Amino acid sequence: MTSKNDTTINGDGSATEIKKGAQTNFFANFIAALFAATVAAIWWISAEVFTPDGTNLWWEGWQFFGVLLVAAAAVAGFLTTKYYLKNRHSHGKRDTQSATPLLALVILGVISAILLLTALVYVQIELLTPPGDSISSISSGELLDVARSSAFGLGALGAVALLLVNYRKQHAVESALELDRIKHTDTLQQAREDLQHEREKQSKHVELENAKQRALEISALHDRFSKAVGQLADSKLPIRLGAVYAITGIATDWRLRRQYVHVQSCADLLCSYLRTSPQTDTNSVSSSDKGSRRASGVERDVRRAALEALSSMANPPKTGSFATMIKQIQDHLAGAFQGAPPELKVDLSGAALAGLDLKNSRISGVNFTGSDLTEATFASADLSGAILRDAILTGVSFLGTNLTNAVPDCRTLRLQGAIDLPPE
């Protein structure tokens, strides 16, 4: 897969190749011109030496071979330079064993300088001497001027060569810096990708561990619920009382997880228990109470605890531990987007709750249809929306009870035997 960085590098590489091609052609043409000028100077000097004075060399027939020789030198210099630079670019850097030794390059430069100096001196002397005169007829002053101008010309050529060498060094440094920049950019990009990959890997690992932890906690809650079901059916009253408190804690844990279906399951279990006939401890119940639906003292404690648990499930306390308060705040904020938690359904139709003290309980919307509430106390309780049809209300105290929207109305409840009802 090609990344954006790779595309940028490829684009820079194409521009670099074009730049290298232009530089190669420039150097090849320069070397070709140098070779041609050197051969032409040597050919002209040789022709002047081996021909009599006064001979017009421009129109000699054998000068054609000199022209061919100069052209061949130019072509040879161009092709040699192109081949050398091509191999150098393809290998990245020259092999130290196959490259031209530095000493040979120095010697070649000295020879070229001598040849150029000789050519410059000879050409100037030829221009200063009249046709037909020997070059030895030049005066010493003129010879000094020729030497000075030739030295200046050679120095100018040396300066040009020095500029080319410095340019080559500068280009090499810039190329090295560009390669380092690309390398560092690639390294930085790779480090970023590795860091991002490691973060994603760590995030997935944390999510997996959290999922495992949640699965373990949910499994533990199911195990606790199953154990509480068994304890609630135990024949011993203290064990049943402990089961009620255990179910209350399980419902609280489910509520903190916003698993209201399981909270309703806990409430349904307690309602089912309350709808059954009271169980009594044979060691603590007299023979006269056997067969009665009125629960014994300990059984009343169990049933009162179950009703208090239902009250707390329907109306969770606003105070508690710091973690509970934080969770309640989260639930409140989540409710603004997801809606309020569903209302808990408490179905106690036909339940045996005679003689229970249910002061300050808050079980709005409870269904007491057909329940036995004889002499029970609901003082200061919240029974708004409660259903009390066909319930046995003989001696039931509703002092300070909230019966808003309860059915039937207070007049009917009074006829069913309820007392301490608010005035109509």
Image (spheres, rainbow, N blue to C red):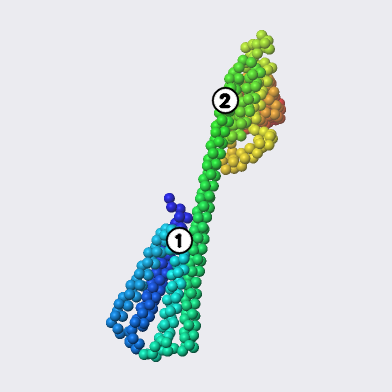
For residue 21, which quarter of the picture? bottom left
Residue at x 66%, y 18% (from the top left corner): 238
Residue at (33% x, 75% y) in the render: 69
Res. 238 in view: yes
Numbered circle sitting on residue 209: none
In the image, residue 133 sits, relative to residue 389, either above or below, namely below
Residue 63 point in image, percent of width and height:
31, 80
Image mark for residue 12? 1
Amino acid carrying label 2: it is Asp
Residue that badge 2 annotates:
223
Instruction: Name the residue nearer the viewer: 35 or 336.
Output: 35
Image quarter hosting the C terminus: top right
Front position in the image: 277 or 2: 2
- Circle 1: is it few (<14), some (14-19), or many (20+) Cα within 10 Å? few
**Looking at the image, which residue is at 52% across and 58% down?**
181
* Residue 100, quarter of picture: bottom left
